[in-house]
Amino acid sequence: MSDRVGVNEAVIASDPYSARALYARQLGALREKAGMSYMQLGALCMYEQSYLHRLERGQRLGTLEVARMLDKVYGTGDLLERLWRLAKRETTDQLVRSPAPFEVNAARIREYAGHAIPDLLQIRAYALEQLEGAQLPEEQVAAEVAERLERQSALAGSEPVYYRALIDEAALRRKARDPQTWTAQLEHLIEAAQWPGIALHVVPFAAGPHHLRGSLELISLRDGSTVAYTQGSWSGHLTDDPEDVEALRVAFDALRDTALLPAESLTFLRTLLDTHSAPDPR
């Protein structure tokens, strides 16, 4: 069992009265009150001992079905189900500004960008344009641009992280306001697509509608675990709940299967650059 302190364990440590912490403690208290070992409990509810242990430590939240099964075993009505629902809502509402602390320890990063170039592939001028459009204070814009560029060090260096990016065609059709910035951004994408350890896929309009909205980053850590970071216009959500992460991974893989292959994507980007750089016939 890993000694890594995950997202949810950190929440429990910082707030012992969170719904997540109360749920985990209640599970342990009920088992001890019943005088059961993990082996005995596992035989009754048909779940592995290690899995039940993780639930009581708060390493996993588990599913609604698990909470209902344990309610039956302990004869607690719908107590555990109600606690689980509160903890689930609490987990979903974890707001974080950036996935940077997890990217530092990443072995692999998979990302989908639907409306803009991924942060890890942005040049400075493009990042400035994007953030200035949000009407943020100048010092905040400068700090966020600097952080994005610092995060990109994970893709370079002597041991670059493996990185797979799915970039929606919509993000590539929405040019930067400054033509020179857009030229430089496309040139950077073309260069980065040829770096070792990077696989870049364009998701064409022809792929049709899909389940992913906003942006998604799946960060696989060196200990074998994975966290998922989803981002909207003003905030991001981070979770390491295995059930949530697995659902997002399945959606990512399904979208990847509809995307252009890396070689096809490189051709797409080069054509886009040629079209952008061509003189106006007027």
Image: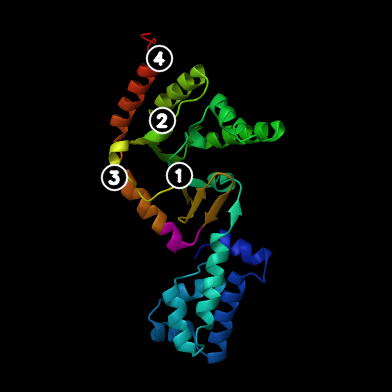
Q: Percent from the top left, x then y, of residue 219?
A: 48, 49
Name the foreground residue: 19 vs 279: 279
Residue count near mark 4 (Cα–Cα under 10 Å), binned few <14, some 14–19, many ≥20: few
| Residue type marked 1 | Ile
Above-or-below relation of 148 to 252: above
Mark 1 neighbour class, 10 Å CA radius: few under 14, some 14 to 19, many 20 or more: many
Q: Name the residue under label 4.
A: 277
Residue 281 is inside the magenta segment: no
Q: Nearer the viewer, mark 3 or mark 2?
A: 2
Q: SS for tag 3? A: loop
Disc nearer the start of the sequence (3/2): 2
Determine whether, in the image, residue 78 is placed left or right of residue 257: right
Q: Report how far apart the C-alphas of labels 4 and 1 lie in the structure.
A: 31 Å
| Residue 218 horizontal/vertical position (percent) | 45, 49
Asked whether the residues under the numbered discs 2 and 4 touch, taking CB atoms below 8 Å apart as contact, a structural biologist would say no
**Image quadrant where residue 275 sits:** top left
Q: Report the residue at 56% width, 46% height from top.
A: 99
Residue that mark 3 sits on: 257
Residue at the spot x=51%, y=20% of the render?
Answer: 181
The correct choice, above or below, for 158 with respect to 280 in the image is: below
Query: Which label lies toward us, 1 or 2?
Result: 2
Which label is found at residue 109?
A: 1
155 and 229: which one is in front?
Answer: 229
Q: Which residue is drawn at 45% across and 88% down?
A: 73
Is the C terminus in the top left, top right, bottom left or bottom right quadrant?
top left
Instruction: Name the residue that disc number 2 marks.
Output: 172
x and y percent of residue 79 in the render? 54, 83
Determine contact: label 3, label 2, CB under 8 Å. no
Tell me, yes or no, whether the two marked residues, 1 and 3, touch with CB atoms within 8 Å.
no
| Callout 2 amino acid | Leu
Report, in whole angstroms, how far the alpha carbon at label 3 lies from the one at label 2. Answer: 19 Å
